[in-house]
Amino acid sequence: MSFEEGKWPRSKGESIVLTCDRDKVFQNSFFHNLASQKKTETGTFATSYDDIYIPYHEMGHSLSADFFRFTSAFGIDDTIKLITALSNNLTFNENALNAFFEHLKTAPAEMNVQEELIHRLPRSIYEHGQSLDELKTEIAQLGTSNEGIVQLLHLNSVEIFQIIGLAMVKHGERNILFINSLSDFALATELGQPIRADHSSFALNPEKQEYGFLLSNIPFVNHSLNLNLYGAMLKIYGSSMQKYVLSMMYGDKLVQTLKAEWTLGKNIILKNLLYNKLLKDHKLQ
């Protein structure tokens, strides 16, 4: 998808390149509906996304990425700590991590998937290692702390700000909370779609052979829903937990469905009244 020069301030390039077919790639989602959900053997729900999410997400980065790079460089970015405090049941599955890396080593050399994995990871995850074993050791070390697990789930503050829409920056003695009205969360709320939970993704029996090596079949990092956080964010984005759940259940057919349920309920009430009246009259006779 190409964009005219100068249309996107602070963008590193003039185009967003969609490099892969994502049909068989799934992302963790706290909310799901029958049309979009996938369930893994571990009980994790996931959802695949339409292409609109990809350019929307990447365009959002062009507006905020440089700012958060500077806040990180000056040591005033506390977003990871904020999300750690707001997250529930952060877990790390070292067995799943080991299985992923053992399978990765079996990839045919001509695929270059090992080099691709190392190239794709940001320096916040992979800074010192020169081999797959060193990379696995660094990931396993991050998995020993809640802040490290959040870093594995979201990668960095730039991704958190675009996906969830929150960031925390220190200014002297003050903590400044930033809310992104152009976040992925806000878009999902507006469209009544499953809300992306983090930046991690995995593949379920992928058709593309390289996905079977680059993406784990079982997520080795996970977390669970924080109703207070997501309820508050839904209100900020002009919705509510009740409204959003109804939208997920019924979509655009909410009014018609409620009318149908009301008609059905009314008929059942009338039938019960009629039945009880007939039963009472019969007994009187």
Image (cartoon, rainbow, N blue to C red):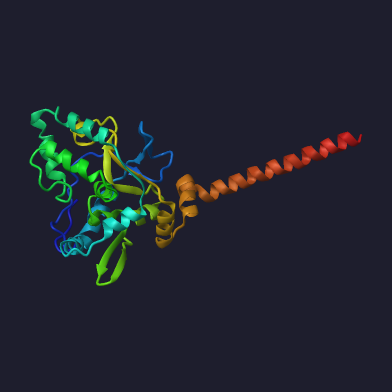
Q: How many marks?
A: 0
Q: Which residue is at 24% across, 46% downward?
A: 152
173 w.r.t. 181: above or below: below
Quadrant for the C terminus in the image: top right
Q: 38 or 18, which lies in front?
A: 38
Q: Position of residue 148 (x, y in %)?
A: 25, 48
Q: Which quadrant of the figure has residue 48?
A: top left
Q: Which residue is at 37% across, 52% downward?
A: 188
Instruction: Report the side of 89 relative to 147 (left or right).
Output: right
Residue 213 visible in the displayed image: yes
Q: Position of residue 238 (x, y in %)?
A: 43, 61
285 w.r.t. 246: above or below: above
Q: Position of residue 95 (x, y in %)?
A: 26, 32
Instruction: Report the side of 99 relative to 276 (left or right).
Output: left
Residue found farthest to the right? 285
Q: 80 or 37, which lies in front?
A: 80
Q: Position of residue 150 (x, y in %)?
A: 28, 49
Residue 23 visible in the displayed image: no
